Structure formats: structure tokens, C-alpha cells
Image: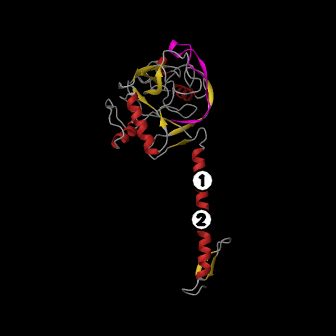
């Protein structure tokens, strides 16, 4: 037993057993233990930081408890576009050289309302009486989407953005080359659109249907999604590296994925539309993307 007041009980550095020591000895041991604790603490933080910076393809994460759920999409290449319409032509090879993160779902009313409550988003869009919560935020313009992007970037300290058109189609196709990521035909109960089985012309809560091979929900139908790119009537001269196309008619911005209002041809992986950058519409929303490094 240690003498009262003179001896101190300390853990042995190797065995973990309790031993006795005098005050001076204890001060020396405590000093060494403090240094070790500090060293191991910094090492753990370094490993944790490296792991966060090196997220793996398929990994999902959030930058805060209420932030958009993101999924890491691997670098790769694919053939973008189709021969179905002039606006989708010519099909061309695009190579994305870096992994990137993209929202698993379209930005929801719950996420938008959080931005509005914090003062980051000035506009509160109506929900058409269909409900808010997990339904995609609609009645939005491209400019509104950019306002949300600026707010979430500031909140998290990360570089959020709208996906480029090439990134969006690459993520929507998820290593497929058929009209839809699930196959050649629209079928039933794969998405929310006018030809998809459910005839109610309204949005569905995000994530109501099976995700694609990269883990993304609602890349076909539900809400049409604003993209970073300016509108061009064809892919002639389009970037081949996945970058957004910042030349063209920038008063119009690209929409992808189609919406609950569209028929089968409007919700293919190659379908593309345009809309005025500052005009709101009850079928239009967006999803976010984020750089990983």
C-alpha cells in the first residue's frame, strides 16, 4: 500500500498495473505520459484527416448531421450523349480523371428550409401542397441553386458546386450504356415520371425508388435538375474532360434527368433540356456536387 499523502498511485507504462511513487518520480512520469498522450493524439488526428481526405469510391458521407448525403463517384470514362436527338449528339468520349462526390438525392425541402432559416437562402419556394420534408425542393431557378451552394460551402468549409453536365450523366449512367440505368425500356416503378406507372403528377419523396449502381436516387424523373453548364444546342465542341461548358448561351442553363411531368423519352440518361437561369418552375430542382481535394 502507498503511504497516505506521500505516495501516488500511477499506472505502469507497460503492464498497466498500479504502482506507488513519490511526488518527484510521479512528476517525471506524468510529464512523459503527457508527451506520449500528445504525440498519440496528433497521430490519431493525422490518420483521421487522411482518411477523410482519401474517401473511396462508393463511400457515403455527410459534412454535418443535417447536410446532404454524398457518395463518392470513381474516376472513369464513358460515351456521353446519343443519336436520338440533335441536342444529344454527337455521342463523344469523356474522361473524368478524378473521383468526385455528388448528392445521393436531389436537394430536399428540409435541406432548403434549413438554408432559408439560417439566412443563406432568401427565397422560400412553395411546395404545391404536396408537402415538404424529404420531397425534392422545387419551384427553384438556377440562381436559387447557386445561392444554396454558396451557403452550404460556407457552412461546411468545403467546395460544393453544381455538377457539370458530363459528371451528371456519368453518375446517372453508372457504367451503363442503355437508355435508362436499369435497362432499355422504361418499365414500371423504376422512377417518377408520366410513363413510369404512377399516374399522379406530383413529386415523390426522394429515395422512393431503387438507386442506380453508383448509389444515386432519382436520376430519372421526380425533379429536373439544374446543371452548371451553359446551354449549347449540340455537343459539337463540348469539353472532353468532364469540365462544365461555360461557353454558349449562358442565359439558359442545362436541366438533366427530366421530371414527374415527362414521358419516357424525357427521363433517359441522355435527355437534356434548357431553362432560363433566373426563372422558377414547379418541376425544377437540383442536386449538389463536391470536390474531394
The x and y percentages for residue 50 are 60, 48
Asked if the stretch drawn in magenta spans residue 232, the answer is no
Q: Which of 139 and 133 is in front in this view?
A: 139
Q: Residue furthest front?
A: 247
Helix, strand or loop at label 2? It is helix
In which quadrant is the N terminus drawn?
bottom right
The residue carrying mark 2 is 37
Give the residue at x 59% y 17%.
91
Helix, strand or loop at label 1? It is helix
The x and y percentages for residue 93 are 62, 21
Tell me if residue 67 comes above or below residue 143 in the rendering.
Answer: below
The x and y percentages for residue 260 are 42, 24
On residue 46, which mark appears? 1
Q: Nearer the viewer, residue 231 or 72?
A: 231
Looking at the rendering, which quadrant does residue 242 occupy?
top right
Boundaries of the magenta span: 79-104
Looking at the rendering, which quadrant does residue 140 occupy?
top left
The reply to whether residue 194 is in sight is: no
The reply to whether residue 116 is in sight is: yes
Decide if residue 17 is on the left or right side of residue 61: right
Q: Separation of disc 2 and disc 1 at Cα?
A: 14 Å
Asked if the stretch drawn in magenta spans residue 80, the answer is yes
Looking at the rendering, which quadrant does residue 129 occupy?
top left
Q: Which residue lies furthest to the right in this view?
A: 14
Amino acid at each position: 500500500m502507498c503511504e497516505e499523502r506521500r505516495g501516488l498511485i500511477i499506472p505502469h507504462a507497460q503492464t498497466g498495473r498500479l504502482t506507488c511513487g513519490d511526488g518527484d518520480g510521479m512528476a517525471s512520469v506524468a510529464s512523459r505520459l503527457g508527451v506520449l498522450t500528445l504525440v498519440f493524439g496528433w497521430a490519431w488526428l493525422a490518420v483521421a484527416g487522411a482518411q477523410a481526405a482519401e474517401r473511396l469510391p462508393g463511400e457515403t458521407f455527410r459534412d454535418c448531421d443535417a447536410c446532404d448525403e454524398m457518395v463518392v463517384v470513381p474516376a472513369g470514362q464513358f460515351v456521353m450523349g446519343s443519336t436520338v436527338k440533335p441536342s444529344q449528339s454527337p455521342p463523344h468520349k469523356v474522361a473524368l480523371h478524378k473521383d468526385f462526390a455528388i448528392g445521393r438525392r436531389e436537394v430536399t425541402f428540409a435541406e432548403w428550409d434549413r438554408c432559408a432559416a439560417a439566412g443563406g437562402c432568401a427565397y422560400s419556394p412553395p411546395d404545391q401542397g404536396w408537402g415538404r420534408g424529404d420531397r425534392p425542393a422545387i419551384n427553384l431557378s438556377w440562381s436559387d441553386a447557386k445561392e444554396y451552394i454558396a451557403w452550404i460551402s460556407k457552412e461546411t468549409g468545403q467546395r460544393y458546386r453544381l455538377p457539370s453536365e458530363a459528371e451528371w450523366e456519368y453518375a446517372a449512367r453508372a457504367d451503363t450504356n442503355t437508355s435508362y440505368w436499369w435497362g432499355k425500356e422504361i418499365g414500371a416503378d423504376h422512377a417518377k415520371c408520366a410513363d413510369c406507372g404512377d399516374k399522379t403528377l406530383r413529386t415523390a419523396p426522394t429515395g422512393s425508388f431503387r438507386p442506380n449502381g453508383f448509389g444515386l436516387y432519382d436520376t430519372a424523373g421526380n425533379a429536373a435538375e439544374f446543371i452548371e453548364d451553359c446551354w449549347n444546342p449540340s455537343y459539337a465542341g463540348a469539353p472532353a474532360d468532364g469540365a462544365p461548358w461555360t461557353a454558349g448561351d449562358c442565359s439558359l442553363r442545362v436541366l438533366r434527368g427530366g421530371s414527374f411531368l415527362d414521358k419516357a423519352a424525357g427521363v433517359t440518361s441522355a435527355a437534356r433540356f434548357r431553362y432560363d437561369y433566373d426563372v422558377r418552375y414547379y418541376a425544377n430542382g437540383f442536386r449538389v456536387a463536391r470536390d474531394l481535394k
